[in-house]
Every structure is written in C-alpha cells, then in structure tokens.
Image: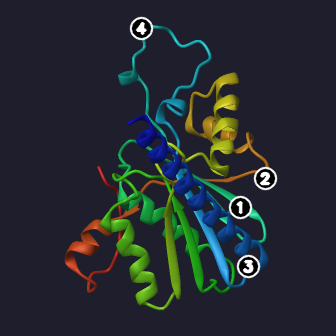
Amino acid sequence: EIQNYRNLLKAHHESQALERSKVMRHRQKVHQSPKKYMCIIFDGIDQKKTCLPQCQRLPNDIGDECLVQIHLVVCLLYSQEIKPQLYLTYPNIHNDPNLTVTVMQRELQSWPGILPPVLYVQLDNTARENKNSMVFDYPSMLVEKGIFKKIKENFFLIGHTHDHIDQMFSRFYKKVARCDAFTLPMLTKLISEAYTPKPEVHNLNEVYDFKRFCNVGDGMNIKGSCTS
C-alpha cells in the first residue's frame, strides 16, 4: 500500500514537471519569435493585503467590516520584454469571469501594432474566476473571429502554482507592510514603486458583462457595466 502512494506521488510530480516544462517552452517561443507568439499571465492578490486603510499599527478593535477591500489583479505581458500591468477594483466589482475577460480584453486592445497569431494564457487554478466556461468562451470567440489563429490556456496543478508573478506579490507585500496607505492613490503609488520594471496601474471601475453576452448570443453588443 505504501508503494502505491509512492507511485501516485511520483506520477504527480512527473505530471507537474511536464506541465511546467511545457509552459517554459511557450515563453521561450515568445522571446524568440515575438511576432508570432505572445503570452499573458493573470493572477489576483489576497485582498487582506491591499485593503484600505493600510496601517503598520492598526488598532485591534477595527475589524474587517471597517476596511475597504481593494482587489488587485496582476497581469504580466510577455513579448520581447516583460510588461507588468496592475488592475485595482473596489468591492462593487466581483471577482468573477467578467473581471478576467475585461482585463484580458484591455490588454489585447492596448497591444501596439498587429497581434501575433498565437496567444498563450496562464491563469490561476480557480473555478470562480478562471476555470469556467465563460473564460473558455472568450478565447474561442477570438479564434472564431480570426483575431488569433490559436489560443492555449494553461492552469498549473493545484499546490504547484508558484510562478514569476508570485515574485511581484512578495514585493508588494513587503512594500505595503512597511508603509501606511490611507487612500487609493497612496496605495497605488506604493504598489507601483515596489517592483522593477515599474508596473502600470489601472483603476478598474467597470467590467464587460460577458456572462450576459454568452447567454444572449453573438447579436448583443458588449457594453461596459459596473457589477454589484
């Protein structure tokens, strides 16, 4: 019986190593042929690390209900260089597929020049925001409309999701822990100064209602809407 568990653990480690090796090959392709490939990595940060106000010495009688939960989505855009992008949202924006699709759409719209034909997307392994039909429908639509020839979405195995983007999180945590931030502009300034190359920070006040778009059909125009 012990040997069976050892075999299962070995198979798990081999699967994890194969998955990470594949992702590294994708990123190597991006660096070698940026006109043919591009890669986007998404992940969200723990909201307790970015709530407002951020104080080094917060009174014990102040509970979470007194704080404003600020959600931070980090996006790394791989091309010939790595371009970090940060999206800050208030609690009225849900952490759901609409947020993921909106961030991806904004990144693609801001791409200078012609988009490469192949897109690699690395997402956090969470069903609520990423691993669901909505986030699969969006890239399918991009391929169907001829914007990309191929899109590959990747999710690391649970328990093995540590990646380049976690280094950014570590820098943010250390910076915020050493400084006070009482307003969103103060928090934005702290975060933008915590990492090199300096990330571009966006305050996201509305998202596309892509869930409704998928339910209604292709005839509907996607309009920006604030989810609550």
Is there CB contact under 8 Å for labels 2 and 3? no
Q: How far is the residue under mark 1 from the one under mark 2?
A: 8 Å
- Does 147 sit above or below residue 52? below
Residue 219 location, x and y as percent? 26, 86
Q: Is residue 118 above or below residue 159?
A: below
Sequence-first tag of 4 and 1:
4
Which of 127/207 is in front? 127
Residue on which the image places disc 1:
83
Type of colouring: rainbow
Q: Hey, what amino acid is under mark 2? A: Pro
In the rendered image, residue 75, in percent from the top left (x then y), is placed at 59, 57
Residue linked to disc 3: 34
Per the image, label 3 sits on a secondary structure element best described as: loop
Q: Quadrant of residue 141?
A: bottom left
Residue found 46% across the figure and 8% down from its top: 60
Disc 4 target residue = 61
